[in-house]
Image (tube, rainbow, N blue to C red):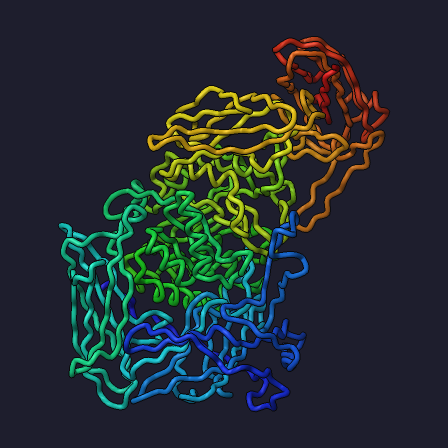
Amino acid sequence: MVGMIARNALIGVSIIGLAIPSLAASQESRPSLPAASADESIASPQRQRIELSDGWQFNLVGPYSDDGALDSPQADEWETVSIPHSWNRVGYYLSDPETHINTPENIEKTQGVGYYYKTFDAPQLNDGQRMFLEFDAVSRTGEVWLNGEYLGGHRNPFGRFRLDATALVKPGEANELYVKVDNTQPAEGNSTADVLPMTGDFFVRGGIYRPVTVVVTEPVHFDMLDYGGPGVYAATTDIVGGDAEISLSGRVTNSSDSDAAVTVVASLLDDQGAVVGSWRDEAVIAPGATSELEGSMRARSPRLWDGLSDPYLHTLRYELRAADGTVLDTIEQAFGIRKMGLDPERGFLLNGRPYRLVGAGFHQDTEESDWAVSPEQVDESLRIMLDMGANSLRLSHYQHGSPVHDLADKYGIVLWSEIGLVTAWTNARDQVEAPQGIVDNARQQLLDLVHQNYNHASVAAWGIANEVDFGPGRPDFLGRPPEVVADPMPLLNELADLSRDLDPHRPVVLANCCEDRGMVDVPVVAEAVDAVGANRYYGWYYGEPGELGEHLDGLRLKHPDISLSVSEYGAGGAPNMHTDDPLGGPIDMAGRTQPEEFLTWFHEENWRELADRDYLWGIWLWNAFDFGTTVRAEGDAQDINTKGLVTYDRDIRKDAFYFYRAIWSDQPTVHVQGRRYVDRAYPVTDVRVNSNAPSTTLIVNGSELASLSDCDQNVCVWQDVRLAAGENAIVARGSFAGGPVEDAITWQLDEEQHDAFRIDSGAVVAASAEVQFGSDDFFVGGTAGSTDQRGGRGRQAVFADIENTDRRDIVSSFRQGDFSYRIPAAPGRYRVTLTFVEPDQPAGARIFNVSANGQTVLPSYDINQRAGGTLKAVSETFDIAIDDSGIELGFSPVEGQALVSAIEIVPQD
């Protein structure tokens, strides 16, 4: 082999047949279908392609019964569908249901068996031509019957497969096609027990969710049964002195009954059609045999594929010719000439120079189509990421379809492409090693992935696993952890060896979760691969963002020869949930309290740790878009992971999106944060603007504030901006060389809020009351607490019963410790009301002083004694006159910790 896909690595696929409703049954027992009207397209003069998209009948049988038998589909249960199709629809937002496609009423999370049926008119087959059925993906498993006979199947939910239908098809006649699809959740002994993924924070849909095509070839053709791949392969092996060396391979199948003398000719064409490189080889192929021809070509001074700056694509044309020169088969593919590499010190290298990869993880679902996405929808998603400034995507956590790879080639997006080995590689709690069926399935998915995407310039690395290093600390929400944890290293080593055999030109990578995070019995899986991605959530699931950089430096020192990247970091964020201070109280990482502003803060602080660590070969935030899962009830969504920077429906780009656009993209960017937090709680606020302009000016209600330049991380902040009662026009104007760029939003301030400050202490999102409170803000020091016990991950919240108040939700949270509030109130006279609730301390255990602008107003205050016990609200009121220095409230402990539950400051005029 000359750097090509190695044949000795291939394995077979076992097919298990299953009886289905008889194809010879009466018309009453199967659906009545119109004649097929396939849309024909010609891929080359020698191949005919007919897409089978319309006129399918579908029947969702559903889960297996207890004895493992199937219920037979009933005649009145069939519905007409088009392919691509999935029977699942997962995830919906709780807010504004009238603006969304998904609702509780149309969600479908059934896992089990569905049948697809179609009649189609097959083309005539002349002079030994062959007909294949091509399925771009069937999930989880697909089994195919043609004209009553079992044809074959596939057990990879994400890869293309082809079946030779020549022996069973009726050329020129109507043909009956049945496909049994099974997306049963894998469990020991069931129908999908060996089909990865076993678990994960995403939902594996069921259906024929990518296209189905009839392909007709000449009897001698490029191999159609080469793991769903094109049968022809090319790789840039070196670029020296401006010339490119390209290794080539072509697999030729002879389905005729005599020897076939053939010539394979490969030509590399530039965008003007000029040949810049060529290769040819000859062979005699025996009847029924498949042979591989290998060689190389040199392209003289080619224009390189150079990422976003110049994603130049040549055309690679393979021709298969008979001895008399007749062209038997042709395959053309876009081909980018580039050299990629990894260096532990310099990071990712593109054409010999450091080229830092920045982008996001990317799941394939959308609210509109779930998994059955069109190329146009994929294009929309990629364009959104390009607009953000991403130059790379991590295709998570499985093989994605052809459109994303084709478009990435076209746009210059670098891809990390991986298989569906996620978290678990056993399906019984006492298994100490991966069952052979799962090992084979992982190999199958890797074989499909590499064969089908080998020729894509955009693919930089093959990923073999995601987060298989939890050890015994696997989270419960990903499935009950095993009693014993199998060692993942034998499987990882086998997959890494297979990947290197298939493609020695791309590194083997994986994403880990847990190394050096203080967890018990964590396997060091980084040692199995060439490069690693760290999935780390400092500041969300654990720790603080400021710990991330030191942690990464430690991993680098520990593995100096393994290139390191950050493959996931992120936080949940609901665009209809807001806070005045993202640090004002606790976030529900597993619950509802996930304001958009915290998501923004999280990314700003994590990027601060990542920006200057040039040894990182890639940085992929989690996630590009909100996506469907069935293990979450968080933020304003059900069964949606809300860590996306863009909503599931692609309609809302959250503020954090523009943070990255301002630092990753060269496009002039000016964006005022908080545009969806319209009804403001406070009359004074900071205004934050993402801007990559040399100078940015803020205009509030027609008045210009000071211009700012050299803003930290391109986030310009105007502090203590005073709002007017009613409508407030906020305009940010960036001064660019090409002219000004503006962003304008409108905020509202109710008359009741003008000059008033009502603070829900200890709450990151203010509770509702008869008047508007803001979340905890203006504080210095202290920590947030609550009388309630939070729920999430299946636990029910427990709400404290608080007496003497009709604002239970407001006063249930508190700030405690040694702290103060510095409130930018305008000059005037104010009435201050402080509300206290003692959560758990007896009288005498918590005593503190309260001061206002240095004067003690509540000396030696004991909440329990004053209120007459715990969980009883008590309020204290005093007046204060101030000049332009504002109000400072001090809470100083005498015994235990000081505490306040709510603050109200209302002008007295």
Q: Nearer the viewer, residue 643 or 4?
A: 643
Q: Is residue 608 visible?
A: no
Q: Quadrant of residue 161?
A: bottom left
Residue 266 spot, x, y in % from top left: 20, 68
Q: Quadrant of residue 237?
A: bottom left
Residue 754 spot, x, y in % from top left: 67, 23
On the rendered structure, is 315 left or right of 663? left
Q: Quadrant of residue 62?
A: bottom right
Count the marks: 0
Relative height, residue 352 to residue 457 (above, below): above
Relative height, residue 679 to residue 278 (above, below): above
Residue 618 spot, x, y in % from top left: 37, 45
Point 53% across, 23% down: residue = 702
Relative height, residue 771 to residue 175 (above, below): above
Please identify the residue farthest to the front as the structure is shown.
702
Residue 502 spot, x, y in % from top left: 31, 64
Q: Nearer the viewer, residue 844 or 371?
A: 371
Point 42% across, 33% down: residue = 741
Looking at the rendered image, the quarter that the N terminus falls into is bottom left
Q: Nearer the viewer, residue 17 or 673?
A: 673
Looking at the rendered image, the quarter that the C terminus falls into is top right
Q: Is residue 484 visible?
A: yes
Point 73% across, 35% down: residue = 768
Relative height, residue 168 to residue 238 (above, below): below
